[in-house]
Amino acid sequence: MRSEWHKSSYSGNTGHCVEVCEGAETLVRDTQNRHAGHLEFQTQEWSALLKAVRGLL
């Protein structure tokens, strides 16, 4: 079952946001360009990406 699209907690108030939809796969899209489609990640890939990015902060 897929959840609803929601704004990423890492998006600021500048209008430059990404939305995430989590389910069997994680979908990511640009809030201002929804018509451009989305990126799709397997759960393990998305978790690894978040872990790597958090390590840079």
Image: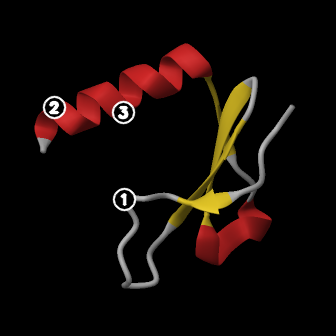
Q: Residue at x 38, y 83 (%)?
A: 13
Q: Which residue is mark 2?
A: 55
Q: Are marks 3 and 1 in contact (CB under 8 Å)?
A: no
Residue 36's label in the rendered image is none
Q: CA distance from mark 3 to mark 1?
A: 11 Å
Looking at the rendered structure, the kind of residue marked 2 is Gly
Q: Is 32 placed above or below 4 here? A: below
Instruction: Report helix, strand or loop for mark 2.
Output: helix
Q: Which residue is mark 1?
A: 10
Q: Residue at x 22, y 37 (%)?
A: 54
Left or right, 1 with respect to 13, comes to right
Q: Are marks 2 and 3 in contact (CB under 8 Å)?
A: no
Q: Find residue 22 and report its image quarter.
A: top right
In-front residue for pair 9/35: 9
Instruction: Report helix, strand or loop for mark 1.
Output: loop
Q: Residues within 10 Å of mark 2 (few under 14, many from 20)?
A: few
Looking at the image, tell me whether mark 2 or mark 3 is earlier in sequence order. 3
Looking at the image, tell me whether mark 2 or mark 1 is earlier in sequence order. 1
Left or right, 27 with respect to 57, comes to right
The color scheme shown is: secondary structure
Query: Where, quadrant-wise, is the C terminus in this rendering?
Result: top left
